[in-house]
Amino acid sequence: MKLSKGLKWLSALLVTTSVVTTTVPVAAAPFSLFGSKEQLSDEDIQKIQEVYRSIREGYIEEIDKEKILEGALKGMVSATEDPYSEYFNKEESTAFDNAMSDSFEGIGVQFQVKGGEMVVISALDDTPASKAGLQPNDVIVSVDGTELKDKTTQEVMKLIRGPKGSEVKLVIRRGGSSFEVKLTRDTIPNYSVTSNLDEQDKTIAHIKIIQFGENTAKELENAVKKAREDGAKSFIFDLRNDPGGLLSQALAIGNMFLKDGDVILQTQERGSDPTVFSADTKLYGDFKITEPYVFLVDGGSASASEILAAAIKENTKHDLVGEKTFGKGTVQQVLNQSDLGELKLTIAKWLTPKGDWIHKQGIEPTVAVEQEPVAKAVSLSYDDTLAKGQSNDGVKNLALILKALGYELESTEYFDDKMEAAVKAFQKDKGLTEDGQVTGKTADALNEATREYLKAHDVQYDKAKEVLKQGNNS
């Protein structure tokens, strides 16, 4: 099967990580799309039949026929050892399709299955996951006491999602230590672009691409037009924590920044030469962004956002500011398996305009900037208590927060007298009971203060403004 350049076909291709809160819309193709050249032999079928009969007739408990068949299908897909290929049963397919709605209720985290574990890619901005401080490469160990080892993404989604206002407890492993976070589920909107003018310089528009959904290119075009009307003369396009989405949208958006003929990306299927996709106003429209601009990227920028970042880096002199991207260089297609469910299958790799495969490598920014250490802090627990005399990961986390908020400390690993005094000073500043312990309202107040601090101290965004004003990104 050769990848077509037609947008109707491309709209069914995914370049995204696994997403708990949002999945970009896809048009499922028939499961028979790849033809029927490869068939099981009679001997192969006989082996399967023997195992099937043994289970149905000999297993200690009666087991449903459909359950055995589903297990066989999932087993075939697992043989690929590809974290992005999955078989969905009917129920899982419905959950997958429901994620196309305008909004739903969850926590806002993207993850991939890696070695049987749920590894965080990113947390969507202003969601329970981001407020709790979940970071790329965190491992979600359990949900409400249920271990996640070797579970599918759909099984994990079912555990994590729930009604707005309900609580969910996650055990997170970061590095060599584990900790628990309690999150309150909320409504997660499924829009893909936000925009606002810079508070200090109204000629700069900050436009964030949250994901590459079916309408993202049009949303971006409208956001740029509105910003121009409001006086914007330059742009900061933010791809941080963007897990990707539809290949068609990556192409349409890449076309906005490049000249006709510039290569946006290449795709390569098994045993085939690369297929080149280039900017083309006849295919993707004539809307262009010609003002000065820079892009923001980080470790949560994956798939479609990396396609765009690579196209900008290899075709223009415009800067990528931030941190190395995630490194996801494959393309998936959702195939409808009639009454049995759906198959999400990796069918190709995508390459940068110059032909590089960034899978598991990522894209280096042209201007490297790390966020402040407190950006890695984990949300403090409302239920647990941190107090004088303790020495654990929670205390280290508290020290990051207190130092960022301007309180003096002597130790960052031990809850000593100085740390207790800092906590009491914070409690006094916020009108809370001055007991020097971090729990309940004090924990919530510290979490909120941290969020406000990070909004006001986004060093990557500040650097992007600086780079933009230097005039090298016109």
Image (tube, grey):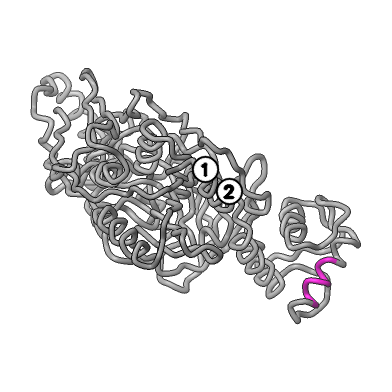
The magenta segment is 422-428
Left or right of residue 283: residue 257 = right
Q: Secondary structure at mark 2?
A: helix
Please tell me in which quadrant of the rendered image residue 327 appears: top left
The amino acid on which the numbered mark 1 sits, given as a three-letter code, is Val
Residue at image location 39% in from the left, 30% down from the top:
314
113 and 255: which one is in front?
255
Residue 443, given in percent of the width and then of the height, sits at 69, 68
Classify the position of the C terminus by image quarter: top left
204 and 391: which one is in front?
204
* Residue 65 visible in the picture: no
For marks 2 and 1, give the CA distance. Answer: 7 Å
Residue 222, given in percent of the width and then of the height, sits at 29, 61
149 and 103: which one is in front?
103
Mark 2 and mark 1 residues within 8 Å of each other at the beta carbon: yes
The amino acid on which the numbered mark 2 sits, given as a three-letter code, is Lys
In this figure, which residue is indicated by the disc labeled 2?
Answer: 463
Crowd tier of the residue under label 1, counting other residues whose Cα lies within 10 Å: few below 14, some 14–19, many 20 or above? many
Left or right of residue 304: residue 468 = right
Residue 187 higher or lower than 124, as above or below: below
Residue 47, given in percent of the width and then of the height, sits at 20, 24
Residue 468 higher or lower than 438, as above or below: above
Please tell me in which quadrant of the rendered image residue 207 appears: bottom left
Residue at image location 19% in from the left, 39% down from the top:
280
Crowd tier of the residue under label 2, counting other residues whose Cα lies within 10 Å: few below 14, some 14–19, many 20 or above? some
Residue 357 higher or lower than 254, as above or below: above
Main secondary structure along the magenta-highlighted residues:
helix
In this figure, which residue is indicated by the disc labeled 1?
Answer: 321
